Amino acid sequence: MIAMQYRIILPADYDMDIIERRIRDNAAKLDGFPHLYFKAYLYARRDDGAPANCYAPLYVWQNTAGLTRFLQSAGFARLIADFGWPTITLWLTLTCPEREALIHARFAALHYDAVKPYSDLATLNTDAALTGWDVHHQTLLQADFADDRACLRGDIYRIGYVACGQTLCETR
């Protein structure tokens, strides 16, 4: 599987209710999307203790076919029209959370570590619910999901919604 994320940093005075409304109105449209494992609609608010207003959705794709289809979709074109061309980061997933860990979580924490050259790749830390390896930039993504932000470390985001791909939606 492939983890994917883009982060859109918004102005300090940006009305984050717009992002929350956008999530509320559109997020379920990705439920059942082919080859999507999940999309967590992550966002952070300055007025909630975050260093910046940010929209930073996190996806896990079952394969490149789904990822490509999404990037070529009208929905992604609309995001580009509204916020500009995002820089997208991809990771090969090493661990992936169970559906239940996502559906009931209210917060996500993302933490990034460097993978040092000549590391024993078999011993990479995969304790997080979602772990991904960016082989180009040699970084390790560790993401955890919880109902309480106090137990999380890293960049903390609120989860506005979790869209489940074809397989997961069938089991809801």
Image (cartoon, helix red, strand yellow):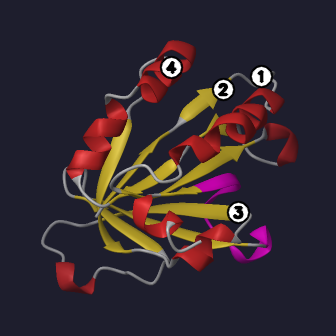
Q: Which mark is residue 107?
A: 3
Local SS, label 4: helix
Amino acid at circle 1: Tyr
Dot 4 or dot 2, earlier in sequence: 2
- Residues in magenta, as a range: 148-162
Which residue is tagged 2? 10
- Residue 19 horizontal/vertical position (percent): 72, 32
Say whether disc 4 or disc 1 marks the residue closer to the N-terminus. 1
Bin the neighbour count of mark 2 within 10 Å (Cα to Cα): few under 14, some 14-19, many 20 and up: some
Tag 2: amino acid: Leu
Marking on residue 14: 1
Q: Earlier in the sequence, mark 1 or mark 3?
A: 1
Asked if 161 appears above or below 102 in the picture, the reply is above
Foreground pick, 33 / 59:
33
How far is the residue under mark 4 from the one under mark 1?
19 Å
Q: Position of residue 133 (x, y in %)?
A: 29, 63
Q: Is residue 20 above or below residue 136?
A: above
